[in-house]
Amino acid sequence: MRILLTNDDGIHAEGLESLERIARAISDDIWIVAPESEQSGASHSLSLSDPLRLRKIGERRFAVLGTPTDCVLMAARKVMPVVPDLVLSGVNRGQNIADDVTYSGTIAAAMEGTTLGIKSFALSQVIGIHNRDALTYDVAEKHGAAVLKQLVDLPLGPGVLLNINFPDCRPDEVVGVEVTRQGKRDQNLLHIDERKDTRGRPYYWLGFQRERGNPPVGTDLRAAFEKRISVTPLHMNLTQLDAFEPLRKALEKM
C-alpha cells in the first residue's frame, strides 16, 4: 500500500513524525509532502495567486510552499510516480472536532484526497481537556496503527472521509473507540483578545476559552470528554436535503 502523509502544522511538525511511525506499522511505501510552514486554519484553500515552490528535503520527503490542499494535489499529480492508495493527514496538534472541521487544514488535506478519489483519513491529537500541562502524541502512536488497520480496507463510498481524534489522556486510560457524529461547539467560547504593540497600535488574537460543556452523547466532543477515540465519517456533499421542500414551496410563488 502506497501512503501519502501530509498535515497543516508543517513539514517539521512533531505530529508528522508521529504519523510516519504510525504509517510504517501499515506499509513501508511512505511518501511525505507537507507545507513548508504552518497552515493551521487554512481550510480547503488553494494557492491561486502565488506560485507553488517544491523543495526536496529527503528520500520521498518534500515541502511545498503552499496549503495542505496544494500539498495533496502536488503529491498526486507531480511528485509521486502513481496516485497513492491512502492519504493520512496529521497528526494534528490539537483536536479537530465539532465546528473545527470547517476551519481545519488537516481535514482539508483529507478532503482533497477524497476529491481525487483516494481514501483519506484525518488524524488529530486532542489537547487541553484532560491534560493541560503538556502535549504528547502517545495516545495516537499507541492506538493509531490498530485503528487504521481496521479501517483501511473498509469501503466508504464516494465523497466520504474519516476524521479521527485521539483523547488527551494516558494510552492505558483510553476507554475505547466510538463512531461519532460531528458535534457543535459553543461559539460564545470563541473570543477576540485585543492587545497593543510597542507603538500603541492594536492587534488581535482569536482563540477559544477552555470551558468544559456537556455535549450530546454520540458526538465527537463527548467522546473526547469521555477519553474515547472518535471516528467521524464526513461527506464532501454539503447539500441539506431537508431544506428542499420548504425552498421549493417558497419559490413556487414566484
Image: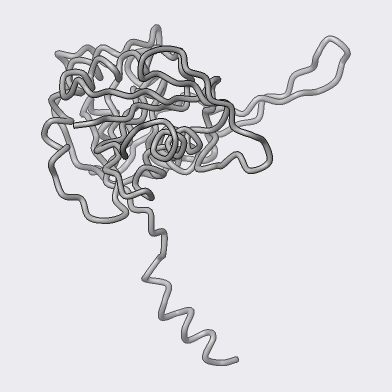
Image quadrant in which you'd find residue 23: top left
Q: Residue furthest bottom?
A: 253
Q: Quadrant of the C terminus?
A: bottom right
Q: Residue furthest front?
A: 81
Q: Is residue 53 above or below residue 161?
A: above
Q: Quadrant of the N terminus?
A: top left
Residue closer to the observer: 14 or 83: 83
Residue closer to the observer: 155 or 43: 155
Q: Is residue 134 above or below residue 176?
A: above
250 vs 96, left or right, is right
Q: Is residue 174 above or below residue 82?
A: above
- Total marks shown come to 0
Residue closer to the observer: 16 or 74: 74
The image position of residue 249, as x and y in percent, is: 47, 86
The image position of residue 116, as x and y in percent, is: 37, 48
Residue found 27% across the figure and 25% down from its top: 166
In the rendered view, how is the structure colored?
one colour
Residue found 21% across the figure and 18% down from its top: 24
159 vs 248, left or right, is left
Residue found 36% across the figure and 32% down from its top: 80
The image position of residue 102, as x and y in percent, is: 47, 43
Residue closer to the observer: 241 or 192: 241
Q: Residue furthest top?
A: 133
The image position of residue 37, as x and y in percent, is: 55, 20
